[in-house]
């Protein structure tokens, strides 16, 4: 085996492992969501596979001819990559959403292919080592090639593949490439051994299972797996589902109809403001029901929506009745960055309804970001924020403490029928630098917290250097 071929092989297998690692998050997201815990579990599981694969590959290479091992290992790695799709599809709906569930799903789906593909590197090293005099050059060169492959797999997948193609076809393509390379390697080695009929059958079955596995995604972007679902009883009502959650609902025939309890509370807050048009800023688009409500109930208003996912905007235009224009404009990009470009005192109201899984993205919760929101709000303007928390309510306490750094007047509206102590639920936080208007909330939708300072408790102010939002947020 030449030096170039050896390094190319290690580069490619290392790249494949990192492609699978990043795509694991997208493949698992419809079942366990997207969070720091998700990627922590995936990264830890893949690293365990890499460690065991390196040890096992070296041990096997010392006891067998690597020429006879590498081809089958490549093919097995490809087949195991295919199998990750049906495994996740089968286990995902019932595994749960807590940290053990994340690790279990990653373990069954991606540990084995990471281990097998990593085992190839020490096998290649064994082939390249001809004397102790070149140990450093061989090991160092292959290590560099493996690291370069991992970097390529990371950057190319994260910056290109995820945005350009759905997850499952990419995994199928990676697996097919590995199987073909393994077959070619076996046929061109000294033994020229063909796979057994049984091995071919397993490979074909695995590919078939991967192709037949249920795909919960109607559309898939760099940020979410999503679908639009029609209401069974009302054909004009459509729900936007992203990963594990319903992120919005819109009535195509009646923009004043707000389906969800928490959205109705936001609507009640809008209704409580002074009569006339308002200039509203929205952090997150969802189904774009709130901008539609403002335009329907307050003609002449303007809405600027900051939405990070451009595909979501296209879906909303195609299926959710979104029509952009002077009264409703959309800027795609991260809201944290976009807000810094907005004019001071430019908005009467800001609606915060951005989520990554069950949690508000941490960088949209900190005192530094709230300071920017305070800057763009006009005097007397209102910031209304949708959050999900419960049980100990630690995130709500922290966020209210953070809002208190910038706004003298704060309120919280919590469910009437569900106790916060029972677990995660939508809660609406409202803040302003002037006394809040009287908000007429339907008793079935929520109730105001009587003592906001007591509700805040001992919450710690969230800052850019300390904002463990996902750890503070209650998990189901």
Image (cartoon, rainbow, N blue to C red):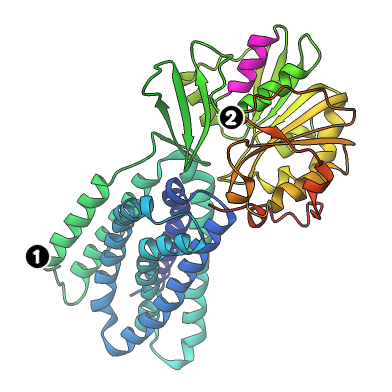
Residue 197 is tagged as 1
Q: Nearer the viewer, residue 469 or 57?
A: 469
* Dot 2 alpha-carbon crowd within 10 angstroms: few under 14, some 14 to 19, many 20 or more: some
Q: Residue at x 64, y 52 (%)?
A: 473
Which label's residue is closer to the chain start, 1 or 2? 1
Q: Position of residue 66 (x, y in %)?
A: 29, 80
**In terms of secondary structure, where does tag 2 sit?**
helix
Residue 315 vs 469, above or below: the answer is above
> Does residue 468 lie above or below 259 as drawn?
below
Q: Which residue is mark 2?
A: 261
Q: Residue at x 33, y 57 (%)?
A: 84
**Apparent side of residue 199 relative to residue 17 in the rendered image (left or right):** left
Q: Is residue 370 magenta?
A: no
> CA separation, marks 1 and 2?
58 Å
Residue 411, quarter of the rendered image = top right
Secondary structure beneath dot 1 equals helix
Discs 1/2, front:
2
Look at the image and tell me whether residue 397 can be seen.
yes
Quadrant housing the N terminus? bottom left
Furthest toward the top, the residue is: 299
Predominant SS along the magenta part:
helix
Residue 296 magenta-highlighted: yes
As displayed, is residue 8 above or below residue 404? below
Does the image show residue 367? no
Where are the magenta residues, as a range?
288-298
Where residue 192 appears, as percent x and y from the top left, is 16, 72
Task: List x then y, in percent, for residue 143.
Answer: 50, 74
Residue 76 on image: x %, y %: 27, 66
Q: How many numbered discs sit on the rendered protein?
A: 2
Residue 82 appears left or right of 409: left
- Nearest the camera: 353 or 307? 353
């Amino acid at each position: 085996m030449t030096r170039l071929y050896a390094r190319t092989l290690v580069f490619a297998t290392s790249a494949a492992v990192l492609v699978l690692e990043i795509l694991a998050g997208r493949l698992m997201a419809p079942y366990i969501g997207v969070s720091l815990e998700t990627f922590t579990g995936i990264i830890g599981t893949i690293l365990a596979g890499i460690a065991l694969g390196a040890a096992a590959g070296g041990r096997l290479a010392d006891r067998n001819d690597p020429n006879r091992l590498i081809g089958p290992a490549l093919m097995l790695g490809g087949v195991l990559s295919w199998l990750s799709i049906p495994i996740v599809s089968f286990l995902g709906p019932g595994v749960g959403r807590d940290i053990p569930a994340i690790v279990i799903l990653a373990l069954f789906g991606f540990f084995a292919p990471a281990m097998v593909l990593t085992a190839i590197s020490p096998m290649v090293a064994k082939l390249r080592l001809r004397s102790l005099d070149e140990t450093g050059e061989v090991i160092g060169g292959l290590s560099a090639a493996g690291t370069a492959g991992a970097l390529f797999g990371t950057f190319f997948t994260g910056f290109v593949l995820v945005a350009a193609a759905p997850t499952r076809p990419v995994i199928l393509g990676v697996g097919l490439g590995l199987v073909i390379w393994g077959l070619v390697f076996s046929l061109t080695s000294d033994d020229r051994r063909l796979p057994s009929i049984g091995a071919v059958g397993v490979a074909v079955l695995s590919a078939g299972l991967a192709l037949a596995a249920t795909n919960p995604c109607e559309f898939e972007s760099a940020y979410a797996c999503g679908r639009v679902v029609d209401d069974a009883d009302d054909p004009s009502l459509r729900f936007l589902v992203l990963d594990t959650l319903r992120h919005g609902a819109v009535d195509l025939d009646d923009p004043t109809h707000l389906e969800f309890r928490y959205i109705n509370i936001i609507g009640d807050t809008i209704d409580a403001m002074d009569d006339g048009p308002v200039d509203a800023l929205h952090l997150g688009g969802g189904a774009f029901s709130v901008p539609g409500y403002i335009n329907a109930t307050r003609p002449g208003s303007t809405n600027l929506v900051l939405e990070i996912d451009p595909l979501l905007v296209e879906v909303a235009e195609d299926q959710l009745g979104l029509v952009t224009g002077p009264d409703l404009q959309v800027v795609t990009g991260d809201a944290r960055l976009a807000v810094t470009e907005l004019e001071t005192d430019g908005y009467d109201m800001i609606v915060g309804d951005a989520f990554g899984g069950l949690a508000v993205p941490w960088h949209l919760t900190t005192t530094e970001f709230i300071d920017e929101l305070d800057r763009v709000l006009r005097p007397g303007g209102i910031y209304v924020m949708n959050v999900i928390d419960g049980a100990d309510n630690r995130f709500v306490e922290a966020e209210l403490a953070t809002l208190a750094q910038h706004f003298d007047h704060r309120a919280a509206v919590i469910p009437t029928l569900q106790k916060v102590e029972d677990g995660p639920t939508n809660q609406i936080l409202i803040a302003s630098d002037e006394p809040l208007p009287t908000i007429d909330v339907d008793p079935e939708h929520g109730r105001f917290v009587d003592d906001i300072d007591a509700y805040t408790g001992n919450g710690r102010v969230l800052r850019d250097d300390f904002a463990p939002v996902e750890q503070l947020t209650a998990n189901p």
